Amino acid sequence: MTRADMNTGPRIPAAWKRRGPIALSVSVMLEGWSDDAAPGIGPMGNPLRAGVLDLQARNWADYGPKEGAWRLLDLLDQNGIKAVFYTSGIVAERYPELMREIAGRGHDVAGHSWAQNILPAYLNKEAETDDIARCTQALQAAAGRRPAGWISPRCTPSGNTSTLLAQAGYAWHADIFDRDLPYYMETEGGPLLAMPFTMEVNDMPLYIRYGNEPQAYTHILKRILTQWSQVGAAPICLDLTVHAHVFGRPFGLIELLECLRFAKTLPGQAWLTSHAELGALYRAEP
């Protein structure tokens, strides 16, 4: 008897069951750093000594809102895909026209803290409350609607994050790695949908951190999708994640496009979706 036969674990909405076991969510990380900070890891691979601002890394990251996000928008539109753009509040403040374009093309804008160098794990409760509010207000002002979902920088929340998000009116929280399927968590601020976030098909660890060739991104996705039936074919969340400043570049777009095209060849097995759509499915069948 399998776990599915026993009907244990998180509930699966009927609309999911009709479409296939693998919910392949498309997410774009649209990230920014405050003026006195830069990414801790970049393409040069040799961090500067402590206390020195890495202008190369910061300039590299600026490609995201200036070029990469626009390229990704066009590619997604050409392939009929809706994504969630997890966006730093500082990016929304600096590039409001980009936020309007993302929302105007039917994508969802979700919270990603005020700036990537501000980690919830380092903040006290009051400071984190202010950070969530500041990011939320910037995204709502620029995109024209309130964000429903959140993922923290480095996907690392504090012990207060889920409660604070529920209190702030968020619907889902994606700093979640302990289950294969979404589930409702109870917080002091009320219930909040825990949205699993997988790292297997993510350009940041694969290409930047571990130095794989871009094709590794596509190879891993194809391997999972073609072999999933061999390990039980249970329903699962799988994320197809790109950063606008990493795979928003031409070499990354090639791999993302190949992944999207391949996923579409597997009807009844894998279906392209987003965290926003999954959240809506769960809200529709509470």
Image (tube, grey):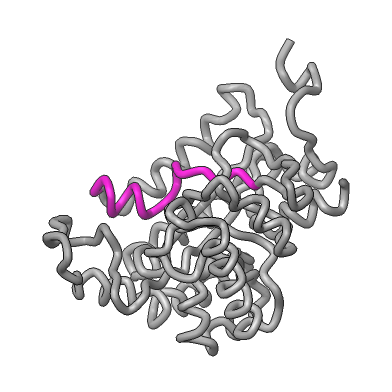
x%, y% of residue 167?
73, 59
Q: Residue drawn 34% across and 46% down?
A: 216
x%, y% of residue 26?
56, 57
2 w.r.t. 55: above or below: above
Give the total of numbered labels. 0
x%, y% of residue 245?
36, 69
x%, y% of residue 166?
72, 56
Q: Bounds of the magenta span? A: 195-211
Given residues 194 and 72, the one toward you in this image is: 194
Given residues 110 and 68, the one toward you in this image is: 110
Q: Would residue 154 appear left or right of 286 to someone viewing this image?
A: left
Q: Residue drawn 64% across and 71% down?
A: 107
Q: Residue drawn 62% across and 78% down?
A: 137
Quarter of the rendering containing residue 277: bottom right
Please identify the residue farthest to the bottom as the structure is shown. 97
Query: Quarter of the image containing the N terminus?
Result: top right
Q: Residue drawn 67% across and 45% down?
A: 194
Q: Would residue 51 appear left or right of 38 to someone viewing this image?
A: left
Instruction: Report if residue 240 lies within the magenta region.
Output: no
Please identify the residue farthest to the top as the structure is shown. 1
66 w.r.t. 123: above or below: below
Q: Would residue 248 appear left or right of 7 to someone viewing this image?
A: left
6 w.r.t. 72: above or below: above
204 w.r.t. 270: above or below: below
Instruction: Report if residue 206 lies within the magenta region.
Output: yes
